[in-house]
Image: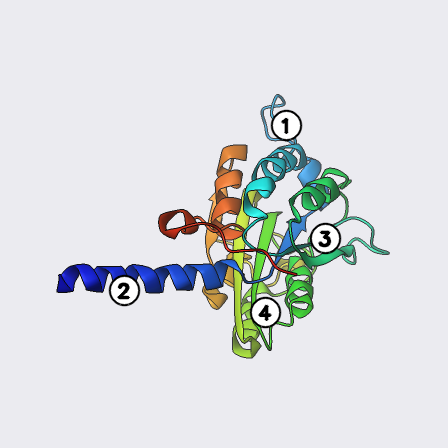
Amino acid sequence: MKTAASLALSLTIAAQTALADCSTDAMLVFDGSSSMSEVGFDTGISTRIDEARQAVARIMPQVEHFRRIGLLTYGPGGATSCTGLQLHFLPQPRAGERVAQEIGALEPSGLTPLSAAVEQAAEVLAYRSQPAVVVLVTDGNETCGGRPCTLGRALAAAGHDLTVHVIGFRVSVDFFTWNNPEQDPHSAATVARCLADETGGTFVSTETVDELVEALRETVGCPLIGQFGTAPRQTG
């Protein structure tokens, strides 16, 4: 009986922790740089942006019930190739349809200022004073001179409880380190992984639509809820 009671208590604590984590506001930071319009060596493969749109359209209706979600994109729309950061909307309830629509309308262009984008998303979430989750979806490395590893350490030091998850989607690593100063030229891994490593987040490398769907489920959504009960009630 004591063992059963202890197990029940452990499950209750785990459920409460999961619910708290899953109700934290999140910003989805999405790659809209020009490389998202590229295809692989097999010309029958869809572009990255087409496949990413499919994944977002599939998963967002499932995960929108767990937390308020906002959207920030980078790439198109800037005065220069490195200034195209756009805050589409702040975290809001049931944001799935709006996320899918905004990403569906993206016309990829520009470079990859992913460090600046993640920093802006953290600021939007007031990460210094409250828990926050940032989920970065990128197909490559920083290409605007940002330093993801340095930024990750700074965010972790200043944040109240900030977690940055990084999803690499068909990543192509840029070895031209003049605009990517922290990239290890001997590594095929994107330097963006530092953002997750430094803040206790998850890094997931994906190649297919199905893999991207699951990665978004694990980071934006809350897969543990199914083990303990129903989704938390959405407020706000």
196 in relation to 102, above or below: below
Left or right: 65, with 79 as reference point: left
Answer with the quarter of the image where residue 150 lies.
bottom right
First in sequence: mark 2 vs mark 3: 2
Residue type marked 3: Tyr
Please provide percent x and percent y for residue 110. Answer: 76, 48
Left or right: 148, with 215 as reference point: right
Residue at mark 2 to residue at mark 4: CA–CA distance:
38 Å
Left or right: 69, with 221 as reference point: right
- Could you say which disc has been placed on residue 46 in the image? 1
Please provide percent x and percent y for residue 57. Answer: 63, 36
Residue under label 3: 74
Residue under label 2: 9
Kindly identify the residue that appears in the image at 71 percent across and 52 percent down: 73
- Could you say which disc has been placed on residue 34 in the image? none
- Badge 4 marks a residue whose secondary structure is helix
Toward the front, the furthest residue is 1
- Badge 1 marks a residue whose secondary structure is loop
